[in-house]
Amino acid sequence: GLERRPWPGDHRNVELLARNLNLYHGAPLASDATTASPLHADGTARPDAARHPGTAIAASEADKATKYPELATSQRIRLVVFAGEVGGRWSEASERFVRALAREKVEEASRPLRRATAAALQRRWWTHLAVAAQDALAATLLGDAPQVDLGRPTSLPPLGDLAARVVQDGRRNASASAGRGASCRASTVCIRR
C-alpha cells in the first residue's frame, strides 16, 4: 500500500501501473507520461530553455512529483515520469527506464544474444514512443484524437528473430551511416540529448 491513500473523489490517472518486474528491486511501477515544450502557451520561452537543454522536461518532472506526492515519496512504489520535449528530446529517466526494461526482457535470452536483443528492443520501443509522441502533439495542435494505431502485439517476436534483424540492419545500414556523422548508429530513431 501507499503511505497516504488517495481520497475517494480523486480523478488523477497514471498511464501505466506495472507489477512483478525485477526493476527497482521488484517495486510496482506507476508511470505518467508528459510532453513538454520549451515555449509557454503564449509563445514566450521558458527561462533558461535556450541555454540549458531539458529545462521543460525538468519542469514537467517536478509538476508530476507535485501531482502525485504519495507516489513520489513512497518506499513501496516507484513513480517513473516518462517525459519528452517537443522536438524529440527524452528525459534521462525515460532513457534509463527503457534501457532497464530491455535488460529485464532479455534475461530470457542466451547470454551471447542479450546485448543485440536489448538494442533491437530499444529501437523498436523508441520508434513506437516517437510515433506516439508526435501523434499526441499533432492531436493537441489539431484538437483531434490520435489516429495512429500502434497495435497491441500479444507477444514479442522470438528473440532469435530480433537478433537476426539486428544483424541484418547492422549490415544494411553500416555503409549508409558511415557517411553521416550519425549518433543514430543505424537505428531508425535518433535520440537527441
Image (spheres, rainbow, N blue to C red):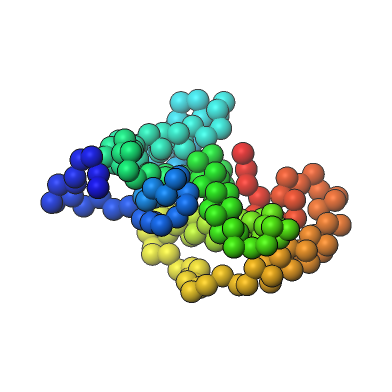
Q: Picture coordinates of residue 2 (x, y %)?
A: 25, 44
Which residue is rendered at x = 66% and y = 50% of the image? 190
Residue 76, visible in the rendered structure? yes
Q: Is residue 65 above or below residue 149?
A: above
Q: Picture coordinates of residue 68 (x, y %)?
A: 29, 41
Q: Is residue 168 above or below residue 4?
A: below
Q: Quadrant of residue 193?
A: top right
Q: Is residue 55 above or below residue 144?
A: above
**Viewer-side residue, 53 vs 104:** 104
**Viewer-side residue, 106 vs 156:** 106
**Viewer-side residue, 170 vs 160:** 160
Which residue is rendered at x = 45% and y = 68% of the image? 147
Is residue 159 found left or right of 176 in the rendered image?
A: left
Q: Picture coordinates of residue 168 (x, y %)?
A: 78, 66
Which residue is rendered at x = 51% and y = 47% of the image? 97
Tell me how many marks there are. 0
Q: Is residue 139 above or below residue 54?
A: below
Is residue 97 found left or right of 75 in the rendered image?
A: right
Is residue 141 found left or right of 4 in the rendered image?
A: right
Task: Give the farthest residue toward the left.
Answer: 8
Q: Picture coordinates of residue 24 (x, y %)?
A: 45, 45
Q: Quadrant of residue 116?
A: bottom right
**Viewer-side residue, 135 vs 144:** 135
Which residue is rendered at x = 50% and y = 68% of the image? 150
Q: Quadrant of residue 59?
A: top left
Residue 127, visible in the rendered structure? no
